[in-house]
Amino acid sequence: MLAIEVKGLTRKYDDVVAVDQLSFDVAAGEIFGFLGPNGAGKTTTIKMLTGQLRPTNGTATVCGFDVVTQRQQLKPAIGVVFEYQNIYERMTAVENLRFSARLYGVNGNRVKEVLTQVGLQDQKRKKSAKFSNGMKQRLLIARALLHQPRVLFLDEPTRGLDPGVARDIRAIVQNLKTQGVTVFLTTHYMEEADKLCDRVAILHNGRIAALDKPNNLKQNIDQANATLEDVFLALTGYSLAGGSVPS
């Protein structure tokens, strides 16, 4: 069963083609990595798949719902965590989630469940302004899980976090997979993608340069003991910091 199906998806801004005829699918319960340099079209793709941005051409369905014509049906089926942390910092963790639960029309009992799920139950009365970046990221994930989405979009969920907190976030993602949640993940950390993802797509100039299981991609380049970072550099010509690789 497919959670996401994309055919010829394209997005143009005037004369600039940000996303160029993408075609791929994601199986239900899969952790799917969507990798690429800055400006490759990752966030634009997520915005189209979540109904926030209308494609110029092509089609896409998420949980069987067309991202253009069935946006109202799509919203309850997905959760989204973008890399910017848009929480209400004057509220506590539990106040943030109760407010969102009312907006979603979700039973208030879910607040306790998701706080426990992301490991914030002991911090629920603390003002969000006093949270570390890692705690804020946990809260964002908890908010996205309130309505029990079938597909969760995570845009750079461990960016800027220390290794221990990043490990905890990855554990949350792996646990979601065991619950049958499909995870669509963007990250600049190739080791993270290698460990977490069932398959990865590497995006370059708005197009998919490669799509396969991480081990298959590593075996397909002519380099001993190749890493996923080696594959990324070979296909995109970019460093993970966003600049071109010197020749």
Image (tube, helix red, strand yellow):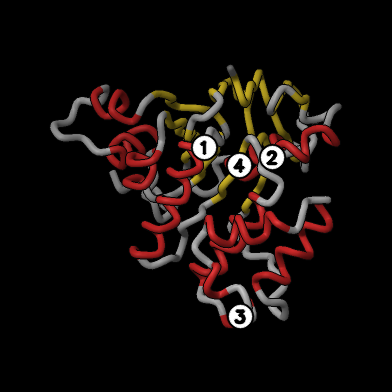
Q: Residue drawn 75% across and 64% down? A: 98
- Tell me whether circle 1 and circle 4 mark residues in contact (CB < 8 Å): no
Label 1, label 4: how far apart the Cα atoms are? 12 Å
What's the CA distance linking mark 1 and mark 3? 29 Å
Q: Nearer the viewer, mark 3 or mark 4?
A: 3
Quarter of the rendering containing residue 96: bottom right
User: How much space separates mark 2 and mark 3, taking CA atoms?
Assistant: 28 Å
Q: Residue at x 26, y 29 (%)?
A: 218
Residue at coordinates 33% horizontally, 41% vertically from top-left? 195
- Position of 221 with respect to 30 (left or right) is left
Residue on which the image places disc 1: 179
Q: Residues within 10 Å of mark 1 (few under 14, many from 20)?
A: few
Question: What's the amino acid at mark 1?
Answer: Gln
Q: Are marks 1 and 3 in contact (CB under 8 Å)?
A: no
Is 207 located above or below residue 78 in the figure?
above
The residue that mark 4 highlights is 152
Q: Which mark is residue 78?
A: 2
Q: Secondary structure at mark 4?
A: strand
Of the numbered discs in the image, which one, if any, rests on residue 140?
none
Residue 126's label in the rendered image is 3
- Secondary structure beneath label 2: strand
**Image location of residue 144, percent across then percent down:** 66, 51
In primary-sequence order, the first of circles 2 and 1 is: 2
- Precedes in sequence: disc 4 or disc 2: 2
Q: Residue furthest left?
A: 224
**Callout 2 touching callout 1 (CB < 8 Å):** no
Quarter of the C terminus within the rendering: top left
